Image (cartoon, rainbow, N blue to C red):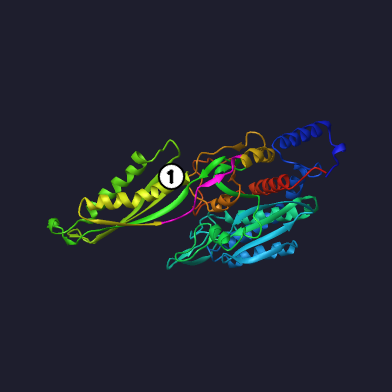
Amino acid sequence: MAKKENLPMTTRFKSTLFLTALSTFGILVSPSVTANTAKQLTQQIESKVIELRRQLHQHPELSNREFKTSQLVAKELQALGLEIQTNIAHTGVVAMLKGGKPGPLIALRADMDALPVTEQVDIPFASKATAEYRGQKVGVMHACGHDTHVAMLLGVAHNLVKIKDQLAGDVMFIFQPAEEGAPEGEEGGAELMLKEGLFAERKPEKVLGLHVTSSMHTGTIALRSGPAMASEDSFTIKVKGKQTHGSRPWQGVDPIVASAQVINSVQTIISRQVDVTKAPAVVSFGAINGGIRSNIIPDEVELIGTIRTFDQDMRGDIKKRLPEIANLSAQTLGAKAETKIQHGYPVTVNNPELVKQMRPVLESVVGKGNLIEPSLITGAEDFSYYALETPGLFFFLGVTPKDQDLSKVAANHSPNFYVDESALKLGVEAMTRLAMVNLTSKE
């Protein structure tokens, strides 16, 4: 990299303004570690990142079964000379980079698991993998971009190793399994990594992560302060009645009619009982199972649904109200309702002060006008568990080619989900810059 005194006057002026802006936010930046460093390092590693991504994409693995993926990750990290731990939360890999100077520890996270989706994208490295999922043989695909997350974080590791002597602090690289949810009867993901002591020995001062999305064009990054992604809890309500002939409903208790009553009453939790001016919330039913013949009123009906909120207190309130309302509604018709709530991911919250500090850094990577503030996302992410432990920042990277209509592209989790690989260098550069800014100090 050219010495500062040899740069053109305009370049020196812009660099000074940028460093001054960061100092305003309380971030100390070394003159020897500038934005150009991250860009140049990323240009050198870009082809390697794409190669890794294609290898991972062609060989996807389901949650808690990321055996070959973790082996590849461990091999790459060991080749960089990093200290690694494996088999955390089944298949997780964690690496530590020691900076050349004393300073804080920050954590960078990537998720590794794929989905039970049969790929339909026509690319040379398309997945042909299959696996067993809930007793059925299914196709397996990186339909949410976790292959790109792993490849990009490995690229960031390559970059930071090259400048480790200039870093004032340390980096924890987290390669996490089972973000999409552990198989039934198993634990997994971020929650299990923390349960097994990920932050026990030394808690990072900050945790950073990203997610690719087809809803944005290549060249854009989205960052939102405060609640960004919803909590997610699922529930099962078993409405129990008394079986009878369909022609004589008075001789039994109809759980189908009772279920209709339960469904309608539960909807009043959102429309009439919680303060939606505080934060949005959703309760949705996704399945109704019960009965087998037109002339038999069954004993039982099963209702399955999901709860989404953007406030932890509201989340707890809804989960308390749901079983009470369901059972009382069923009782009015002589039935009973037994509710089981499967507790899922908390609200993903971006620390406001951290967002304020890092926003100009991300804008410097994509350029003015290309850093956007997204709407609230009702999808959920288990990055939220890390952000409950320490200040977190989670942002989105656009991966749809600029010439494509966003309203027509396949969404994440689709068998047609497509990644513009030219976007990956921005993700690597952004994460590298964030790490550098948080781990540099004045000479």
Residue 319 in magenta stretch: no
Q: Residues within 10 Å of mark 1 (few under 14, many from 20)?
A: some
As drawn, 368 above or below 420: above
In the figure, residue 65 lies in which quadrant? bottom right
Residue 94 shows up from this direction: yes
In the figure, residue 137 lies in which quadrant? bottom left
Magenta-drawn segment: 342-352
Residue 131 percent coordinates (x, y): 50, 67
User: In the image shown, does 413 or 281 lie closer to the viewer?
Assistant: 281
**Residue type highlighted by circle 1:** Met
Residue 246 percent coordinates (x, y): 15, 58
Q: At x 76% / y 55%, what residue is drawn?
A: 161
Residue 367 percent coordinates (x, y): 67, 36
Which part of the image, by quadrant, shows the N terminus? top right
Residue under circle 1?
Answer: 314
SS for dot 1: helix
Q: At x 34% / y 39%, what residue is drawn?
A: 272
357 vs 400, left or right, is right
Residue at the farthest right position: 6
Which part of the image, by quadrant, shows the C terminus? top right
